[in-house]
Each structure stands twice: as C-alpha cells, then as structure tokens.
Image (cartoon, coloured by chain):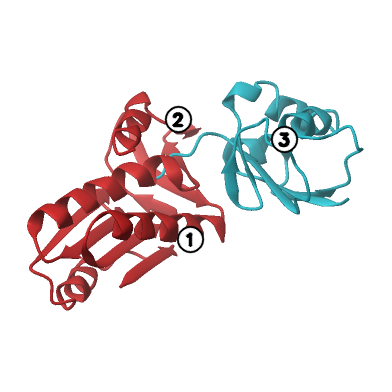
Amino acid sequence: MAIAVLYFAWVRERVGAGEEQVDPPEAVRNVADLIDWLSQRSEGHAAAFAEPAKLRAAVDQRFVPLDALLGDAREVAIFPPVTGG
Amino acid sequence: MIRVSVDPAPIELAMEVAALEERGAGGVATFTGVVRTDDGVEALELEHYPGMTEAALCSLAEAAIDRWNLLGVTIVHRVGRMTAGERIVFVGTAAAHRREALEACAYLIDRLKTDAPFWKREWLAGGTRWVEPRVGDHEAAAHWS
C-alpha cells in the first residue's frame, strides 16, 4: 500500500526532498525496515539514513520508536531529534 | 481556554498576556524564549511539521489542564527565520493561585522541548548548522512524568 514519507531538517536536506510517495514490499514491517529499504533509493537517502540511532519517527503524526509496526500507516515522517522551545 | 499558535509572525507579548489576564484568574505565569547570540550566531531558523506540531502542542496544553487547575493555557511558537533578540516561544498559564500557574508553565516549556516536532538551524557567518538537543532537555522533561 502506498505510504507518504515526510522528511524534516537535515534528513530532508540529505534526501533532497520533503516528501515522497512509496510502495514498500510486504517484508517492510516496521519503521526501521522502511528506513533500511528507503536507504537504497539514492545516495542522498543512504547519507540521510546512515546512522539510524540519530533518527526519530512519527507514524500518522504520532511519535513512535523505530521498531513500531507500520500496519495501515498512511504517513510516516523521519527526522532528527526535535529541538523546539 | 487553550490557545495554540505556530506562526512565522512576531509574537505579540502584551496581547498574549492581556488575553490570559482576561481569564479572571488570580495569577498568570509566563515564559518567553528569546534568540540568543552564541558563538557568532546571526539568525535562527525554526522548522516544524505542519499539523502534527499544532496537535502536539494542544496535547501538551490538555495534559497540563488535566494535572493542574488552570483557567487558561497559551502556547505560541514562532517558525521560520528570526534574529537575535526576537521571541521564539511564549508559554502562559492562568490559574486561581500562583503555584498552579507557575508549575504548569514550567511543565509546558520542559515538555515542549522534547514532545513537539520543531527543528532549529543556526545561521553563522560561514554557513548553517542544525542544533542538536541537549542531554538536560530530556532529563527536564522526564522529571515531570
């Protein structure tokens, strides 16, 4: 099923896009799988996702750990740790 | 009684405080975050996640209302590019008594740093750099759970 993937901050810069539509294979079950799969799309993706420990994620606009299952997710966001305030 | 705003426009402090005072509370506590000039930083740029950021701030305001007896909560966060001395964030709480207003205000600013999707980038003479969270930010937020 198609998923909208959103990128923010330096993840967005390295990927070279703020959003893309993807259709991952069945084997992609959780966020970490998705990151692994996305990293093969381009050199920019590979650079953005080289250190998963520096990445955070949200599924359908809720913060989740990287081992969270995608389930029926419509929107997944991948970004660095947040720094507001 | 909840006001949440994520906006590139400058934060109008007097207007925000006055709106909280009109809640008829005994006390209003506020926190204002201002862009500092560290290590030659000329400007700060704030990026957010439209939709999720506003929802996260509303959730924080609701959590504060569940925990303290509040008459008003305001969270205004600026986004986009701003220069030294400009306001980044305003948090205000109105309550019948000072302790509730002060504690809720401290809670909101601590949680806001770790629980809402914002990213800061510093503009320096030689280029830009993304700001990494401080270890203390998570400790401060965890202290409330």
Residue B12 in the image, given as x and y percentages of width and height: 26, 68
> How much space separates mark 3 and mark 1, taking CA atoms?
23 Å
Residue B104 in the image, given as x and y percentages of width and height: 23, 52
Question: What hue does chain A carry in this figure?
Answer: cyan
Q: Are discs 2 and 1 located on one and the same chain?
A: yes
Q: Residues within 10 Å of mark 3 (few under 14, many from 20)?
A: many
Q: Are marks 3 and 2 in contact (CB under 8 Å)?
A: no
Q: Of B125 and B94, which appears nearest the observer?
A: B94
Pointer 2: what residue?
A: B132
Pair 2/1: label in front: 1
Is residue A44 shown to the viewer in this render? no
- Chain letter of disc 1 in the image: B
Q: Residues within 10 Å of mark 2 (few under 14, many from 20)?
A: few
Pointer 1: what residue?
A: B54
Q: Are discs 3 and 2 located on one and the same chain?
A: no
Q: Which numbered tag is attached to residue A31?
A: 3
- Chain letter of disc 2 in the image: B
Chain corresponding to red in the figure: B
Q: Is residue B6 left or right of residue A80?
A: left
Q: Amino acid at mark 2?
A: Glu
Q: At 72% across and 52% down in the image, what residue appears?
A: A75
Q: Is residue B25 left or right of residue A13?
A: left
